[in-house]
Image (spheres, helix red, strand yellow):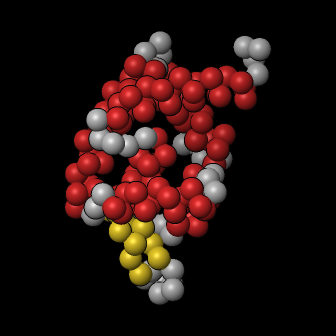
Amino acid sequence: MGSDVGLLLAKLHAAGSILNNKALADFGLRERSFSVLTLACSGLEPTQRELADFLSLDPSQVVTLVDDLERRGLVERAQGKQDRRAKIIVSTAEGRKMHTKARAAMDEAELKQLAGLSVEESHELKRLLRKALWGAAE
């Protein structure tokens, strides 16, 4: 059981989700909405389809998340620069302020979650996860 990568990752994610959602509660956010806000603040100007693909969510879930963030004035749908028919999701000034504060809370939650690791081990874990996900060699 302790050597099954899928189980270990699921357990780590579940424990992290609890910490993350507690950290985000003061901002009226949850992990998924924070992820959308993060990508909206990234400068990548993703479409809703790209958000769904990157976050491994059903497009209808992304629509609901974007609708909520848009109602709150944190993101907006804008006309795509390369494809004018596509709507990109971008953060507002208020969204960027909220993201900065929420990011700090998430960083604290991550420190709690990875408290059993040294700083070097934490960096190595993140490097290995990126490599496993995207083949990123650093």
- Residue at point 25%, 41% (across, down): 101
- 47 vs 42, left or right, is right
Work out whether residue 128 or residue 77 is closer to the camera in this orientation and state it: 77
Residue 133 at x, y percent in the picture = 64, 44
Residue 105 at x, y percent in the picture = 31, 33
- Residue at point 29%, 41% (across, down): 27
Q: In which quadrant of the rendered view does residue 39 lie?
A: bottom left
- 127 vs 134, left or right, is left
Work out whether residue 63 or residue 105 is closer to the camera in this orientation and state it: 63
- 8 vs 51, left or right, is right
Q: How many labels does the image show?
A: 0
Work out whether residue 89 or residue 107 is closer to the camera in this orientation and state it: 89
Whether 15 is drawn above or below 68: the answer is: above
Residue 123 at x, y percent in the picture = 47, 29
- Residue at point 40%, 52% (across, down): 38
Q: In which quadrant of the rendered view does residue 95 lie?
A: bottom left
Whether 135 is drawn above or below 90: the answer is: above
- Residue at point 53%, 23% (across, down): 15
